[in-house]
Amino acid sequence: METLLHSVRRIKISVISRPLSYSATLQSKQWRLSKGLSANRTAEGILTDGPDYTFLDGRPTPLLQKQKLRMLRQQDYASKIVQLSSELDFVKQRYQDNLQKQREERDAVIQNRLKPKGKQMKRK
């Protein structure tokens, strides 16, 4: 019993104190990052990004459900961006027109103000 307990302690100590090496994994990750690839090789690539199958006669494969949803969402975003930017352009133009109209009104008031009469007019 004592020898069994002693061997169990020895196993626990050796498991805890044994250094684990990840150098190959770290080197692979660093190499992939230095080449401009993703850190995880299963995160992207032809096998994960490409279609599951292709037709031999060249027909395009149908989109997956999430691909369709993503495409529709991006189209909605694009149409919303176009709409909002056109509204913004309209508001900018309207603001400039209002400023111009205010300047013209101010200039008209200045032109139509009372003019000097009599002796003051002859001095000029």
Image (cartoon, rainbow, N blue to C red):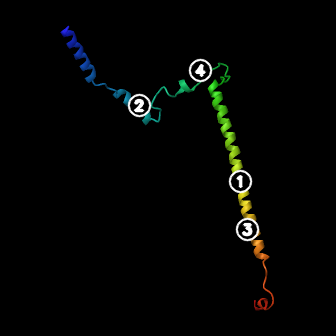
Q: Residue furthest top?
A: 1
Horizontal side of residue 15 vs 71, given as left or right? left
- Image location (x, y in percent) of residue 35: 45, 35
Mark 2 lies on residue: 29
* Residue identifier under label 1: 91
Mark seen at residue 52: 4
Quarter of the rendering containing residue 52: top right
For the residue pair 26 and 123, the one nearer the viewer reads as 123
In contact (CB < 8 Å): disc 4 and disc 3: no
Query: Closer to the observer: label 2 or label 3?
Result: 3
Q: Secondary structure at mark 3?
A: helix
Please identify the quarter of the rendering in which residue 102 is found: bottom right
> First in sequence: mark 2 or mark 3?
2
Graded by Cα atoms within 10 Å as few (under 14), some (14 to 19) or many (20 or more), the crowding at tag 1 reads few
Of helix, strand and loop, which one carries label 4? Answer: loop
Q: Position of residue 4 (x, y in %)?
A: 22, 9
Q: Where the C terminus falls, by quadrant?
A: bottom right
Q: CA distance from mark 2 to mark 4?
A: 27 Å
Q: Residue at x 78, y 85 (%)?
A: 116
Q: Label 3 to label 1, Cα distance in Å?
A: 18 Å
